[in-house]
Image (tube, coloured by chain):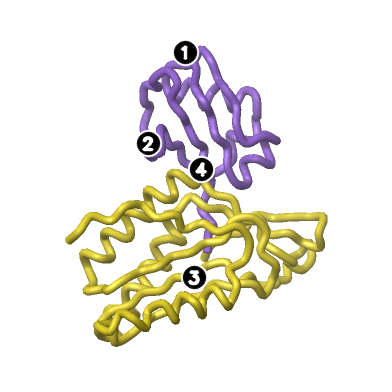
Amino acid sequence: MQVKVLIFGQLTDITGLSELLVTDVSTSNELIESLTGKYPELATAKYVVALDKKVISQETQLPDNSTVALLPPFSGG
Amino acid sequence: MTERKPKNIFKDGPIPASFIAESIQKHSTQKAIGGHSIFLGQVRADETEKGVVSAIEYTAFEEMALEKMHLIREDIFAKYPLTCMHVHHSLGTVEAGEICLFVFTSSAHRKAAINACEETVERLKAELPVWGKEIIGGESHQWKVNR
């Protein structure tokens, strides 16, 4: 069980990298918990979670080899 | 309506004025058009507590942004009688004073072009996963906040 995590924008200031692999998590909440354990500042950061390019708003089962993206507030244009 | 495929809107670096001029020129063959509307976003040298913004470095979740832009495009074409729409957004470094966003809508009459252009700009700023890192004095940075 492996999930690819993509990190964008200001969140990369916290993680220091833009991509990582997380194993042994089965839901989005477990993933966020694991990431927040590793990067405590994520707990107070503002972002939404996208699973395979779709924003999710509640705990969701993560398929093997799926891609989860952490998206802070957009600031294009 | 014919189905439109997702187009790439991203361009590395600033959008040159010559590119914008050529884009306008290309429409001279489309004689059903009676009005164009163009929005150009330019990087502003904001004064911040840390210093003056010298450039913005843009990054995006490109795949998701292109899918989202495709949906916005479909919505706008369904709502307004447009002849065409072109959107270009910079990635990477754009210096203060340079163009980072080019939205170009054309229609038989002005109102559809103007309203579609405005709505497209508002929606893409709110909905596309794109981020601007404001470079301050070449060493410090802060993240752009859209208002």
Indicate the chain coloured purple by its letter: A
Label 3 secondary element: strand
Label 1 secondary element: loop
Q: Nearer the viewer, residue A12 or B34?
A: B34
| Place of residue B136 in the rendered image (x, y in percent of width and height, measured from the top left) | 77, 61
Q: Amino acid at mark 3?
A: Phe
Q: Image quadrant of residue A50?
A: top left
Near mark 3 (Cα within 10 A), the count class, few <14, some 14-19 or many ≥20, is: many
Q: Image quadrant of residue A62?
A: top left
In the rendered image, which residue does mark 1 sit on?
A: A1
In the rendered image, which residue does mark 3 sit on?
A: B102
Q: Are marks 1 and 4 in contact (CB under 8 Å)?
A: no
Q: Amino acid at mark 4?
A: Leu
Q: Between tags 2 and 1, which lies in front?
A: 1
Task: State which quarter of the image contains the N terminus of chain B.
Answer: bottom left
Q: Between tags 1 and 4, which lies in front?
A: 1
| Place of residue A42 in the rendered image (x, y in percent of width and height, measured from the top left) | 60, 35
Q: CA distance from mark 1 to mark 4?
A: 23 Å
For image coordinates 44% across by 70% down, the residue present is B103
For image coordinates 41% across by 32% down, the residue present is A51
- Chain of the residue where label 2 is placed in the rendered structure: A
In the rendered image, which residue does mark 4 sit on?
A: A71
- Chain of the residue where label 3 is placed in the rendered structure: B
Query: Is residue B86 depicted above or below A22 in this figure?
Result: below
Q: Between tags 3 and 2, which lies in front?
A: 3
- Chain of the residue where label 1 is placed in the rendered structure: A
- Chain of the residue where label 4 is placed in the rendered structure: A
For image coordinates 57% across by 37% down, the residue present is A7
